Amino acid sequence: MATIARQRAQNRPVLVVCPSAALVEQLTAQFEDRFWDRISAGSAWKPDKVWNVLPSDVEKLAQRLDEHGGETIVVVGTVQAIQQIDADGKIDRLHGRIGTILFDEGHREPAPSWARVIRGFAVPTILFSATPFRGDLKIFDVDDDHIHFHFLGFNDAVDQGLIRGVEVHEQPLPASAQDYALALIAKVDALTAEGRFTAANKVIIRCDSEESVTEMHQSLTAALDDRTDGVLAIHHNFPERPDDGIFDAVPRDLTTRPERFLVHQYMLIEGIDDPRCTMLALYEPFTNTRMLVQQIGRLIRHPGAIGETAEPAYVLAPEGSGIASEWNTFLTFDAASKANGNKPFVRNDATILENLIAALPTLDYVMGRFRERPDLDDPGLHEDLRFPSAAVAFTIEPDFDLDALEKAIKAELVREDRHEGPRTDDCRRCGSPRWPP
């Protein structure tokens, strides 16, 4: 992304869009200095300016883009920011001022309304993803006649010394958090003693509930006793206590924090870029492969010079959990994508639905009636669609916290392998104390 953004920005400013504010901060740092310093590139490769885009600042940003005077400019913002600018009727302030759009975490390409906003720019758009498949059965809205795939397989990236390899070890492990913490610390100490990792390397511990995160944090803290390793626990429901290593979101300075054991449920799956994270302990494994693949992705950052071989990451899983087999299915998908002309298998455009309809018989006996195959273009199609009438009512307590509800909903969306769609502040007007009804 940094290289393409820098090259394309020689002609016109480039807009880089990502799903979260944390990624905006991370990408900004990478584009400004970190990536170029990492590969020992000369200062001439660095963009002249890296700016953030905020809905409240779009007028000023448009003016700055007009006055940039031929400098190489990269603008970074969230999906939500671009959606809000569009909802405010100000998206035209960016039209004509952006020459290329890059989208990070492309496997989370949002809803059709997002496609409308992006296509309104009428510029080349590139989706980037280290997870070349979707977990929500949605289709990629891309046109095969105007698309080019570039695919780098996992094993090829390992062989080229770009990332770490991965080893999955399934072993008998204690069920209780207290005993598990002791066993995990012993395993980490053994891997350090044999020289595989150093005392600076970190361990991610995955739990399946807020209660488990709390219990594991307490158990590891007690088991480490007076050792200086440190434990950090993250969950969206936690009251933040940084001095105790407890956070309600991923701390911005995670890469520089000293804690060696990082406990979470869903918060450390995406956007963590710390080469010192080399070990994963699945106290309670994920229920789908996408999350497992993305979690393992936090471990494979290369710690040294490009092209050098790095020690494989270490994944510790309960015996009989099937994690090794599950990881191998991803590697099989990876190999099949390579064999498919270096092109991942993506579900694309509305022809999928049309082909499914075409496969149905023209007339069939369904639910007590002979029915003709549906015509999706028939304006009267809605007459054949029946939905149950239902409503759910909730009594809201005086201390109702809409922000806490929003965090809980987001966590549940992640649990069910769904993605949060775009929305505007109008979605919040019905219940927040800050927006009276």
Image (cartoon, grey):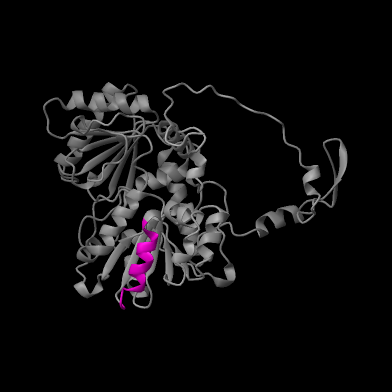
> Does any portion of residue 5 appear in the rendered image?
no
Q: Main secondary structure of the magenta part?
A: helix
Q: Write down the region rendered in magenta.
A: 57-70
| Residue for point 45% across, 50% down | 330
Which of the two residues, 347 or 425, is positioned nearer the viewer here?
425
Residue 263, quarter of picture: top left
Decide if residue 433 is on the left or right side of residue 174: right
Decide if residue 277 is on the left or right side of residue 383: left
Which of the two residues, 204 or 264, is positioned nearer the viewer here?
264
58 is within the stretch colored magenta: yes
Residue 87 position in % (x across, y down): 51, 54
Residue 156 position in % (x across, y down): 36, 62
Q: Which image quarter holds the N terminus? A: bottom left
215 is within the stretch colored magenta: no
Residue 217, quarter of picture: top left
Outermost residue toward the right in this view? 370
Which of the two residues, 257 or 299, is positioned nearer the viewer here?
257
